[in-house]
């Protein structure tokens, strides 16, 4: 029971509370967040840090008329609790439950779907302009973190904000952290403003004093205006935003609701784009998360006891199985000892992509460029052209951002950049914005690019060795989660563009891609038990795929099956089908197991595979049919 929070059953109910109840409500929200996330897993530290900020926004705004756009959206849990979703909060990120990100379909107060970073300013500007053109007058607010502000799209939007000449508020939630510590010039700049506590008062006093200088003719006024600006520049560190045409207010204590409301109201009076710089503590109110905000950014379910004052949580990390990311992490540290030209690039996710220890051991060869996937790729192109062997490590879903950079900056020049594409395939609980199920389609279309999809731990190591010596652009893609160890002995070494036949029979040939090989091997066993003759092939290369092998298979197999965790359009299976249709005269039955042409929701990967027919039973049944 949460006495106050239980009274919030729909949006705007928070407006019925008295200010002296806010503290207790914030406490109840934090308790609900910790209890909930300890059971479902999710983004904890970011949400704990934005409790008062979200409350203040909900007191200030009216839903659904006003438009609130969360950047990334991983910090929107309190927003969900304040808009009537408390009773379903226990289903967060679960199959059939509520999403871990804002979803328009879930609630009218979720104004815009998000999940990827740095989109909020552009979207809010669109909302604001649409409002103006429609003659409406609601408020538009974007909430962006200091990490998300490092993304290129945010800079592009800032550059355009003043031009649009419209009223909107940008709340910059500055907690000094991206997932890890925030990096870059903007982060340093915000640090300078933060440490200058009296900035806002100083700015106002200075402006008032300068305004009192009497007007003495046009030329003198102009001169004075210029000197006012230079004097302001001398004393006031927050001029960057103002020079770009935005009014800057801050820094504001993001855990003080009254201070926040005062700032929002004075921003509104300006009638133009205003940036309200709010300082918060990531993990606020939960000592463990405050002390280790990166660890508690996104967590699996964990243990905790609630004694109403302090939370004694313990992450349930016990004996974690080895993941593909771990294998890569060890590999790069070993290789870097002997290859001085190896450099590694992360876009704000050094830990997630397994580069944490490399960064410690080789700080001069490690680059965290911020949430800037496009820049990461072209920076790598430059490093490669300059004689280094760059390894760019990104999650499949975020690599989508850098399509043109891969094509235009790396592949046209055939530069030796290695792309490590982690979380390729279904990722589960983060849902549709994060599923890595498009990379085969979008990478297969790029000339000069080689795409390798290893099936297990050993093959991953071999693929990485292969990639670093290829001397051309190459992708090594692997899934989230624990490694697989294949049951076959006498595996063949990697040869350019060659698949690997693991078991050769006749009639039905099943070709698996990377993460699906375990399922393929199990399905083949079941098919044999059902009396079928089955060959098992590990595709290994998606691009170029092994056309010769497929031609040979077609000679003594009547059915060719492909299995992968990718959408159907542009899939490996579609490419194989089209090759067979165009080059094999004999009538071959082809079956392609892929994900359908729709966005795949959140849920455990096993649940999703079952729903979309990618589990062993569904595969066997469909082949038998
Ligand atoms: C394009 C893109 N790249 C990477 C990520 C992964 N990611 C999610 S949250 C986050 C850090 C965001 O930091 P900030 O905006 O400061 O929010 P905070 O969690 O600190 O509140 C990152 C890198 C993403 N969501 N989108």
Image: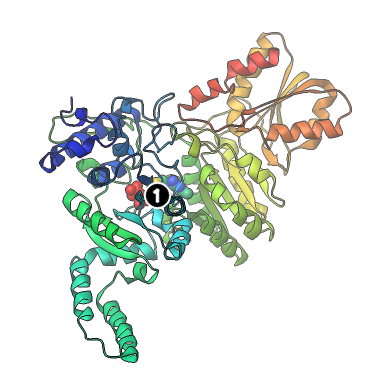
Residue 287 located left or right of residue 172: left
Which residue carries the number 1 mark? 136
The image quarter containing residue 425 is top right
* Residue 476 vertical placement versus 623 (above, below): below
Q: Quadrant of the C terminus?
A: top right
Q: Secondary structure at mark 1?
A: loop
Q: In front here: 212 or 414?
A: 212
Residue 448 located left or right of residue 110: right
Bin the neighbour count of mark 1 within 10 Å (Cα to Cα): few under 14, some 14-19, many 20 and up. Answer: few
Residue 273: x percent and y percent? Answer: 36, 61
The image quarter containing residue 555 is top right
The image quarter containing residue 578 is top right
Residue 610: x percent and y percent? Answer: 54, 20
Residue 502 located left or right of residue 402: right
Residue 324: x percent and y percent? Answer: 50, 38
Residue 124: x percent and y percent? Answer: 42, 51
Identity of the residue furthest to the right in this view: 585
Q: Is mark 1 within 8 Å of ligand 1?
A: no
Q: Coloring scheme of the render?
A: rainbow
Q: Quadrant of the N terminus?
A: top left
Residue 257 located left or right of residue 468: left
Is residue 480 visible from the viewing direction of this image? yes
What residue appears at the point 64 percent right and 44 percent down from the top-left corner? 442
Is residue 366 visible from the viewing direction of this image? no
Q: In front here: 175 or 161?
A: 161
* Residue 436 vertical placement versus 398 (above, below): above
What residue appears at the point 23 percent right and 79 percent down from the top-left corner? 211
The number of discs equals 1
Identity of the residue furthest to the top in this view: 530
């Amino acid at each position: 029971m949460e006495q106050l929070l239980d009274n919030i059953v729909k949006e705007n109910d928070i407006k019925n509370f008295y200010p002296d109840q806010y503290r207790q409500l914030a406490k109840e929200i934090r308790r609900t967040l910790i209890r909930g996330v300890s059971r479902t897993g999710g983004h904890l530290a970011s949400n704990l840090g934005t409790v008062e900020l979200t409350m203040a926004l909900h007191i200030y705004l009216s839903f659904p008329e006003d438009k609130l756009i969360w950047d990334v959206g991983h910090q929107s849990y309190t927003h969900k609790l304040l808009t009537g979703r408390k009773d379903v909060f226990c289903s967060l990120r679960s199959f059939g439950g509520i999403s871990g990100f804002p979803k328009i379909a879930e609630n009218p107060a979720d104004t815009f779907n998000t999940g990827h970073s740095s989109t909020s300013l552009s979207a809010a500007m669109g909302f604001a302009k649409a409002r103006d053109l429609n003659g409406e007058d609601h408020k538009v607010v974007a909430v962006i973190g200091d990490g998300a502000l490092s993304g290129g799209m945010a800079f592009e939007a800032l550059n355009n904000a003043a031009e649009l000449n419209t009223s909107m508020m940008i709340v910059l939630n500055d907690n000094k952290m991206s997932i890890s510590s925030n990096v870059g010039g903007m982060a340093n700049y915000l640090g300078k403003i933060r440490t200058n506590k009296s900035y806002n008062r100083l700015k106002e006093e200075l402006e008032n004093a300068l305004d009192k200088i009497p007007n003495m003719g046009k030329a003198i006024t102009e001169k004075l205006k210029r000197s006012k600006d230079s004097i302001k520049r001398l004393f006031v560190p927050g001029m960057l935003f103002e020079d770009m045409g935005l009014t800057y207010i801050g820094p504001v204590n993001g855990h003080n609701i009254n201070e926040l409301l005062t700032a929002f109201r004075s921003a509104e009076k300006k009638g133009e784009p205003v940036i309200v710089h709010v300082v918060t503590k990531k993990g606020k109110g939960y000592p463990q998360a405050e002390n280790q905000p990166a660890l508690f950014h996104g967590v699996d379910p964990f243990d905790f006891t609630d004694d109403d004052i302090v939370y004694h949580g313990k992450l349930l990390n016990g004996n974690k199985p080895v993941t593909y990311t771990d294998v890569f992490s060890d590999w790069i540290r070993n290789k870097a000892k002997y290859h001085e030209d190896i450099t590694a690039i992360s876009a704000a996710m050094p830990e997630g992509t397994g580069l944490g220890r490399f960064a410690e051991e080789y700080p001069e060869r490690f680059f965290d460029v911020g949430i800037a996937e496009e820049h990461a790729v072209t920076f790598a192109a430059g490093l490669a052209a300059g004689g280094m062997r760059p390894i760019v490590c990104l999650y499949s879903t975020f690599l989508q951002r850098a399509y043109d950079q891969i094509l235009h900056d790396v592949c046209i020049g055939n530069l030796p950049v290695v792309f490590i594409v982690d979380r390729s395939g279904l990722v589960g609980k983060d849902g549709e914005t994060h599923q890595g199920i498009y990379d085969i389609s979008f990478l297969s279309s790029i000339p000069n690019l080689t795409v390798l999809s290893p099936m297990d731990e050993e093959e991953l190591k071999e693929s990485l060795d292969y990639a670093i010596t290829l001397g051309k652009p190459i992708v090594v893609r692997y899934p989230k989660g624990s490694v697989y160890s294949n049951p076959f002995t006498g595996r063949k070494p990697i040869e350019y563009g060659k698949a690997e036949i693991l078991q050769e029979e006749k009639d039905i040939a099943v070709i698996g891609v990377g993460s699906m090989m375990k399922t393929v091997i199990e399905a083949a066993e079941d098919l044999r038990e059902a009396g079928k003759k089955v060959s098992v092939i590990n595709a290994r290369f998606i691009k170029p795929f092994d056309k010769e092998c497929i031609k040979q298979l077609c000679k003594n197999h009547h059915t060719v099956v492909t299995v992968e965790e990718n959408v159907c359009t542009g899939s490996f299976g579609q490419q194989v089908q089209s090759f067979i249709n165009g080059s094999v005269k004999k009538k071959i039955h082809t079956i392609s197991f892929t994900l359908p042409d729709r966005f795949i929701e959140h849920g455990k990967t096993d649940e999703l595979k079952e729903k979309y027919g990618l589990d062993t039973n569904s595969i066997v049944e469909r082949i038998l049919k």
